[in-house]
Image (cartoon, rainbow, N blue to C red):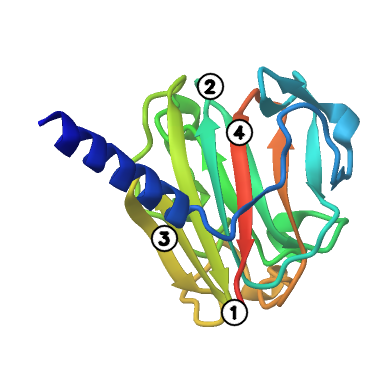
Amino acid sequence: MKKQLIALTLLLSLSAVAEEKGFKSIFNGKDFTGWAGPIDNYQVTDGTIQCKPGKGGTIYTKENYSDFVVRMEIKLPAGGNNGLAIRYPGKGDTAYVGMCELQVLDNTAKKYAKLHPAQYHGSAYGMAAAKRGHLKKPGEWNTQEVTVKGHTIKVVLNGETILDCDLSKLGKTMGPITKFKGRLRTEGHFGFAGHGAAVQFRKVRIKRLK
């Protein structure tokens, strides 16, 4: 039995290593090396990135990415609001000039009860709504994986696919589709679009896709 447990442990360990093959950490857990933008509005606390109280703006990787997969862990405070900047050009509102802003939001907060469907967690802001009901409670860590390939975006939250869309083939959007000028961008920076809440991110790693 002991040998079987050791063999199983080794197998699981090897599987975990294989699962992470090709991923590169883009946040060292200590400082903002490799990042640009209004980094003075953010802080590193206990190995996590988070906004300073009442601050925000979009910070982003100095490197550009075309097709990629990014993985991270996210902890939302009650009422928390942030976003993932996808293919961000380095200036402007990523929800409109980037490919999109993927919402990071406490869906359970009463103040967000009447939002547009494409404003909840995991949604491509204003364009494509993610499925709800798969976030953990505020204060608990969530695992999230985002795959960006061509004009498509797939979001897997805590093991559940909550968004799988093609931004070149959209139905009705929140406002005129022409407002989302960057949705067909083919490359840009990855980042965090903070809105003053202490949303925490850790274990952020990315893999380029060929």
* Residue annotated with mark 2: 77
Q: Which mark is residue 202?
A: 4
Q: Secondary structure at mark 4?
A: strand
Q: Earlier in the sequence, mark 2 or mark 3?
A: 2
Task: Report the label total.
Answer: 4
The amino acid type found where label 1 is placed reads: Gly
* Residue annotated with mark 1: 150
Q: CA distance from mark 4 to mark 2?
A: 15 Å
Task: Farthest residue to the left: give it.
Answer: 1
State the residue at coordinates (45%, 40%): 143
On the image, the x and y values in percent for residue 37 come to 89, 44
Q: Nearer the viewer, residue 62 or 55?
A: 62
Q: Secondary structure at mark 1?
A: loop
Q: Nearer the viewer, mark 3 or mark 4?
A: 4
- Examine the rendered structure and indicate whether residue 69 appears above or below residue 66: above
Rate crowding at label 4 as few (under 14), some (14 to 19) or many (20 or more) other CA atoms within 10 Å.
Answer: many
The amino acid type found where label 4 is placed reads: Arg
Q: CA distance from mark 2 to mark 3?
A: 22 Å
Q: Nearer the viewer, residue 151 or 108?
A: 151
User: Is there a contact, CB below 8 Å, between mark 3 and mark 4?
Assistant: no
Q: Which mark is residue 163?
A: 3
User: Is there a contact, CB below 8 Å, between mark 2 and mark 1?
Assistant: no
Q: Nearer the viewer, residue 113 or 143?
A: 143
Rate crowding at label 3 as few (under 14), some (14 to 19) or many (20 or more) other CA atoms within 10 Å.
Answer: many
State the residue at coordinates (50%, 20%): 78
On the image, the x and y values in percent for residue 115 come to 48, 44
User: Is there a contact, CB below 8 Å, between mark 2 and mark 3?
Assistant: no
On the image, the x and y values in percent for residue 125 come to 58, 56
Q: Earlier in the sequence, mark 2 or mark 1?
A: 2
Q: Earlier in the sequence, mark 4 or mark 1?
A: 1
Q: Earlier in the sequence, mark 4 or mark 2?
A: 2
